[in-house]
Every structure is written in C-alpha cells, then in structure tokens.
Image (cartoon, rainbow, N blue to C red):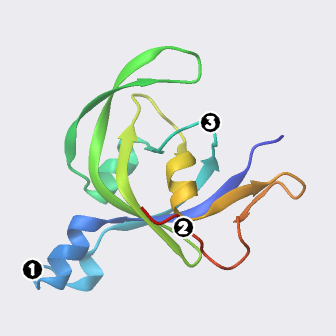
C-alpha cells in the first residue's frame, strides 16, 4: 500500500473556550489546515514543533514513544487539539516527536472519526460511508 494523505484542520481547543467565554474574538482562534500522512501504524496524532507553536498548544507533559525504527524517545504531549476532516471531529492531545517533519494521523483519531483507508482507491473514507458510527461506552 502506498502513502495515503489527507487534508485536516487542527484547532486550538483552549482558544475556542476563550472565544466562547468572550476573552478573545472568534477570529482569534488559532487553526491550521495541513496535509497529514494517514498512518494506521501510529496510535495518535503526531505534529511538528513548528505546528505546535503556530497553534499555541501548551505542553501538558512528556511521554515515552516507540517510533517506526524501534527507538524509544521522550516526546511532548500537548493540551487538547480539535481535528477536523470533512464533517468529522475528534479531540485529543497531540504528540510532538523531536525532529518530526510530517503530521501523522494515527489509529485513535481515525477510529474516533469512524475513518479507514480504502485499499483500492488509496484514500481516506468513512468506514460506514457518510454515516458516522461510533461505539458507545
């Protein structure tokens, strides 16, 4: 299978709360539209340090992460970021891997948005078509 990419928009959740509370204007909410590599072998959302700074995402802690080459590295974990793909949204912390150059959209946000990679067309699609189905907890 080749590399699958998808355009996603990332939004600073804290900014949205501040805007809703009247502390900042809605147009001041930081958001970035980026091309992400859809990586079903990755667990979460991986962003670059540059993107973290553009979005103004605070660091909530560190996490040891195993990367593709098997190496374990200490990574920053951000505050909540909202991920938009078409009509779907997921909210989670992002992982900032030192030296990362690419945004990775991993299995957890894919599952949360009911998305999958179509192996025939090599594109990101809804796992249940246009209907979002999620498991109830």
Callout in the foreground (2, 3): 2
Q: Is residue 82 left or right of residue 122?
A: left
Label 3, secondary structure: give it: loop
Q: Which residue is mark 1?
A: 23
Crowdedness near tag 3: few (<14), some (14–19) or many (≥20) residues, C-alpha within 10 Å: few
Report the disc number at residue 105.
none
Which quadrant of the figure contains the N terminus?
Answer: top right
78 and 48: which one is in front?
A: 78
First reached walking from the N terminus: tag 2 or tag 3:
3
Cα distance between the residues tagged 3 and 1: 39 Å
* Whether label 2 touches label 1, CB < 8 Å: no
Report the disc number at residue 134.
2
Residue furthest out toward the top: 71
Crowdedness near tag 2: few (<14), some (14–19) or many (≥20) residues, C-alpha within 10 Å: few
Q: Is residue 5 left or right of residue 62?
A: right
Image point (19%, 81%), residue name: 19
Crowdedness near tag 1: few (<14), some (14–19) or many (≥20) residues, C-alpha within 10 Å: few
Q: Is residue 103 left or right of residue 74?
A: right
Q: Which residue is mark 3?
A: 41
x and y percentages locating residue 12 in the rendered image? 30, 64
x and y percentages locating residue 60 in the rendered image? 19, 43
């Amino acid at each position: 299978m080749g590399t699958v990419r998808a355009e996603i928009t990332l939004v600073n959740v804290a900014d949205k709360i501040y805007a809703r509370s009247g502390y900042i204007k809605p147009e001041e909410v930081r958001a970035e539209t980026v091309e992400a590599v859809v990586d079903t072998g990755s667990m979460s959302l991986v962003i670059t340090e540059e993107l973290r700074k553009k979005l103004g995402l605070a660091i909530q802690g560190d996490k040891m992460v195993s990367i593709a080459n098997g190496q374990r590295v200490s990574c920053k974990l951000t505050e909540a970021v909202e991920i938009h793909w078409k009509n779907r949204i997921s909210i989670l912390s992002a992982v900032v891997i030192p030296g990362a150059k690419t945004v990775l959209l991993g299995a957890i946000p894919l599952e949360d948005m009911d998305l999958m990679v179509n192996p025939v067309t090599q594109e990101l699609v809804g796992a249940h078509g246009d209907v979002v189905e999620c498991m109830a907890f």
